[in-house]
Amino acid sequence: MAFIPWSHVSLWRCNGCGICCREFEVVLTFNEWLNITKKYGVGFTKSGLNKFYIGKKPDGSCIFLYMAPDGKWLCGLQDNKPLACKLWPFKVLNKPKYGNSKEALFQYYGQNFYVYIDTFCPGIYWGQPTAELIYKVIPEFIEIALGIRQRQIYSTMQFTPRFLIIKKRDYTLI
C-alpha cells in the first residue's frame, strides 16, 4: 500500500473490480461484528487477537462479494457495509501521516483533514483534481469518516453519474 495526497488525483470512481474485497482483511468494530453475526451468523466473521474480521471464501475473497449480471463485483452488505469498506481507498485523517501534508490538506467546513488515497486501487484517475472530486467525492468520504453520513452515493459502485451540477459550498482548498 502506498498512499498519496488527494491533490494528485483527478477523479476516483469505483469500477467494480473487486480487488479491495479480494486482497484485504476487513477489520470490524464490535458493533459491526455484532450486526453481521446477528443477521448472518458467527461463521460469516472470524476473530483474531483483539480484532474481528469479515469472513473469507476459500479463494480469499470477502464472503459477501458477488458478481452482478453486468460482470461488476458488488458488496452483499451494501446497506450495512463496514466503515473500513466504505472508506477504502481513502484515508481521512486529523493529522498528516503519509507525508506531503500541504498536498493532503483538505479544509471542510472550517476543519482541516488530511486526505490520502491508496494507489493500489485501479479506480484512480491521475491529474488535476476535478470539481466532482473536490465538491462531491472527498466531502462524502469525510462525512462517512466523521459518522455524519451513512448513505454512499459517490463513494461506491452504486453511483452512476448522469451529469454534473456543482454548487459552491462553505469549504475551501489549500
Image: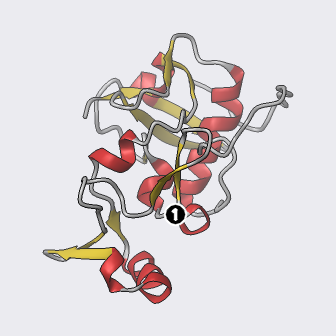
Circle 1 sits in a helix, a strand or a loop, which is it?
loop
Judged from this view, the residue extending furthest toward the top is: 127
Residue 4 vertical position relative to residue 127 in the rendered view, above or below: below
74 vs 31, left or right, is right
Judged from this view, the residue extending furthest toward the front is: 69
Residue 137 vertical position relative to residue 45 in the rendered view, above or below: above
123 vs 154, left or right, is left
Q: Quadrant of residue 166?
A: top right
Quarter of the image that includes the N terminus: top left
**Residue carrying label 1:** 81
Q: Residue at x 58, y 55 (%)?
A: 144
Give percent across and percent down for residue 87: 48, 49
User: Label 1 neighbourhood size at 10 Å, few (<14), some (14-19), many (20+)?
Assistant: some
Q: Residue at x 28, y 33 (%)?
A: 98
Closer to the camera, 115 or 21? 21
Q: Residue at x 76, y 32 (%)?
A: 161
Residue 64 vertical position relative to residue 15 in the rendered view, above or below: below
Question: What colouring does the structure picture have?
Answer: secondary structure
Give percent across and percent down for residue 60: 25, 54
Judged from this view, the residue extending furthest toward the bottom is: 38
Give percent across and percent down for residue 83: 47, 61
Residue 5 vertical position relative to residue 50 in the rendered view, above or below: above
> As shown in the figure, which amino acid type bears the numbered disc 1?
Lys
Judged from this view, the residue extending furthest toward the left is: 49
108 vs 85, left or right, is right
Q: Residue at x 44, y 75 (%)?
A: 32
Closer to the camera, 59 or 87? 59
Quarter of the image that includes the C terminus: top right
Q: Quadrant of residue 109?
A: top right
